[in-house]
């Protein structure tokens, strides 16, 4: 199934603190054997960082999407080490519009998944800096297509 423009997220930044998902194929869960490739798609829920974190991470929120990614996660009441998302570059970052961390926005609109960005990097927590999954916003990709391959966007 193809995506339409209604399935793309052009908003920035996300002031409602919507839930996001980064999905892709981690290198550790992917391998080849002979002429067969095996991969397991995984999904990592998160939220977009705020203004101050973008500044600390030296990222432009107009072109990049920065999702929180901590080294430890709470599962079944116990802290566990998060899986390293190495290899999910090229995967998707999806905003779940309508599902937020702020109670005032819960159930305020229809829940919809929107393609927000393509994952390009992971920075682990170190030197007091938070872990982050970084994506290039979908508008940047469409802008490049429009500039260098405009015929792909012609709808006649």
Image: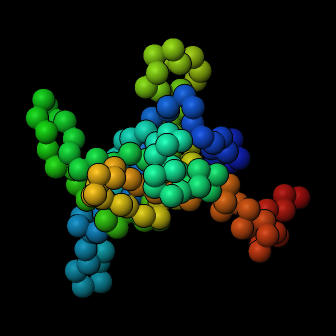
* Horizontal side, residue 151 vs residue 84: left or right: right
Residue shown at 39%/41% (left/top)? 46
Residue that sits furthest to the bottom in the current view: 34
Foreground residue, 133 or 151? Answer: 133
Based on the displayed image, in which of its 4 quarters is residue 6 positioned?
A: top right
Residue at 53%, 18% (x, y): give it: 105
For residue 38, side relative to residue 78 (left or right):
right
Percent coordinates x, y for residue 76 in the rendering: 13, 31
On the question of residue 105 being in view, the answer is: yes
* Location of residue 45 (image quadrant): top left
Residue 153 drawn above or below residue 65: below
How are the residues colored?
rainbow
In this view, the residue in front, 52 or 1, is: 52
Q: Looking at the picture, how far across and down is residue 109, in whole percent? A: 59, 21
**Residue sitting at 22 percent across and 80 percent down?**
33
- Residue 5, percent across and down? 71, 47
What count of labels does the image hold? 0
The quadrant of the image that shows the C terminus is: bottom right
**Compared with residue 70, is residue 57 higher up or lower down, i.e. above or below?**
below
Q: Residue furthest right?
A: 156
Residue 112 in sight in this render: no
Q: Nearer the viewer, residue 126 or 30?
A: 126
Q: Position of residue 62 (x, y in %)?
A: 64, 51
Q: Residue at x 53, y 57 (%)?
A: 59
């Amino acid at each position: 199934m193809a995506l339409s423009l209604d399935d793309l997220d052009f908003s920035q930044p996300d002031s409602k603190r919507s839930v996001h998902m980064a999905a892709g194929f981690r290198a550790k869960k992917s391998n080849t054997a002979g002429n067969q490739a095996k991969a397991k798609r995984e999904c990592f829920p998160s939220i977009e960082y705020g203004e101050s974190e973008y500044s600390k991470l030296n990222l432009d929120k107009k072109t990049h999407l920065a999702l929180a990614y901590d080294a430890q996660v709470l599962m079944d009441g116990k802290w566990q080490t998060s899986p390293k998302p190495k290899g999910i570059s090229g995967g998707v970052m999806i905003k779940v519009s309508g599902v937020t961390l702020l109670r005032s926005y819960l159930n305020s609109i229809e829940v919809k998944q929107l393609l927000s960005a393509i994952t390009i990097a992971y920075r682990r927590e170190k030197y007091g800096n938070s872990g982050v999954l970084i994506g290039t916003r979908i508008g940047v990709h469409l802008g490049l297509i429009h500039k260098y391959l405009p015929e792909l966007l012609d709808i006649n």
